[in-house]
Image (cartoon, rainbow, N blue to C red):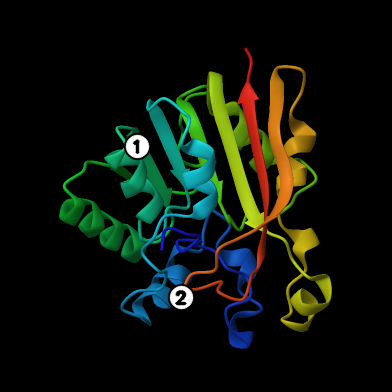
């Protein structure tokens, strides 16, 4: 299956983790916590690239791509196989080690960065594709994460943000409040007239046979193109 198997930051994995959601935000500290989670299993995710990435990047010409929160590297490897010049970042060293091994086995080159998004120091407009698949980015009044994602896209480039369509009742039962985290709608809200929103929808997702997040049936997908 080539479906949403590599979603790295699933907020509802286990009840005993319910108070740790704010520790791995793709932006700053939290790598130690995620290192522990990765060490607890030989493989956390399915190893397949996410279905929304496959669908939305299929018609894009390969250029420079950033995979935000790359986890065990399935998305980054798929992009590299397709001819993209890929940079992938994550706060977990364990995840990056597994991702690098995946890339070596696949015979592709990926630039792995151990960092959060804001700390990485990428220049504005560095990438022709910025892909954030199921990122756990805390929502703040300053909209820092949302603006950072958008700022990294070069003119003519694509921003792709995908998240689970949460059932609020079920999420709250697991001790998770989706309102505390950046959603595709939050990213869309910071896009100005320099952007064209090409996809903004909820769609069914093919559920992987294994790996985290198998209980989620729908995704929220935002794809936008930077005009200038």
Q: Check disc 2: other Cα within 10 Å, few if <14, some if 14-19, many if 20+.
A: few
Q: Position of residue 30 (x, y in %)?
A: 51, 64
In the picture, the quarter occupied by the N terminus is bottom left
On the image, numbered disc 2 is attached to which residue?
Answer: 209
Which disc is residue 65 wearing? none
Q: Position of residue 39 (x, y in %)?
A: 34, 77
The residue under the point 45% across, 61% down is: 6
Which is in the foreground here, disc 1 or disc 2?
2
* Residue extending furthest toward the top: 228
Above or below: residue 11 compared with residue 134 = below
Q: Mark 1: which secondary structure?
A: strand
Q: Mark 1 touching mark 2, by CB under 8 A?
A: no
Above or below: residue 201 compared with residue 174 = above
Q: Position of residue 194 (x, y in %)?
A: 70, 17
Judge left or right: residue 65 versus residue 56. left
Q: Position of residue 121 (x, y in %)?
A: 46, 33
The residue under the point 48% across, 55% down is: 50
Q: Quadrant of residue 101?
A: bottom left
Please tell me which residue lies in front, 154 or 202: 202
Disc 1 to disc 2, C-alpha distance: 27 Å
Judge left or right: residue 107 versus residue 30. left
On the image, numbered disc 1 is attached to which residue?
Answer: 86
Q: Quadrant of residue 34?
A: bottom left
Q: Earlier in the sequence, mark 1 or mark 2?
A: 1
């Amino acid at each position: 299956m080539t479906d949403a198997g590599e979603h790295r930051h699933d907020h509802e994995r286990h009840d005993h983790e319910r108070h740790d959601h704010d520790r791995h935000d793709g932006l700053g500290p939290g790598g130690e916590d995620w290192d522990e989670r990765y060490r607890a299993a030989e493989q956390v995710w399915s190893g397949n690239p996410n279905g929304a990435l496959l669908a939305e990047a299929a018609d894009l010409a390969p250029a420079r791509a950033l995979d935000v929160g790359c986890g065990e590297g399935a998305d980054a490897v798929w992009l590299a196989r397709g001819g993209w010049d890929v940079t992938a970042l994550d706060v977990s060293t364990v995840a990056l080690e597994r991702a690098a091994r995946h890339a070596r086995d696949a015979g592709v080159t990926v630039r792995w960065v151990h960092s959060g998004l804001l700390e990485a120091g990428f220049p504005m407009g560095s990438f022709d594709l910025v892909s954030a698949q199921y990122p756990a980015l805390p929502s703040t009044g300053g909209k820092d994460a949302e603006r950072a994602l958008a700022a990294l896209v070069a003119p003519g480039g694509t921003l792709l943000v995908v998240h689970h369509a949460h059932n609020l009742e079920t999420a709250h039962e697991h001790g998770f409040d989706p309102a505390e985290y950046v959603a595709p709608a939050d990213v869309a809200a910071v896009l100005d007239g320099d952007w064209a929103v090409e996809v903004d929808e909820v769609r069914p997702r093919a559920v992987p046979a294994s790996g985290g997040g198998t209980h989620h049936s729908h995704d929220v997908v935002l794809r936008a193109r930077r005009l200038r």
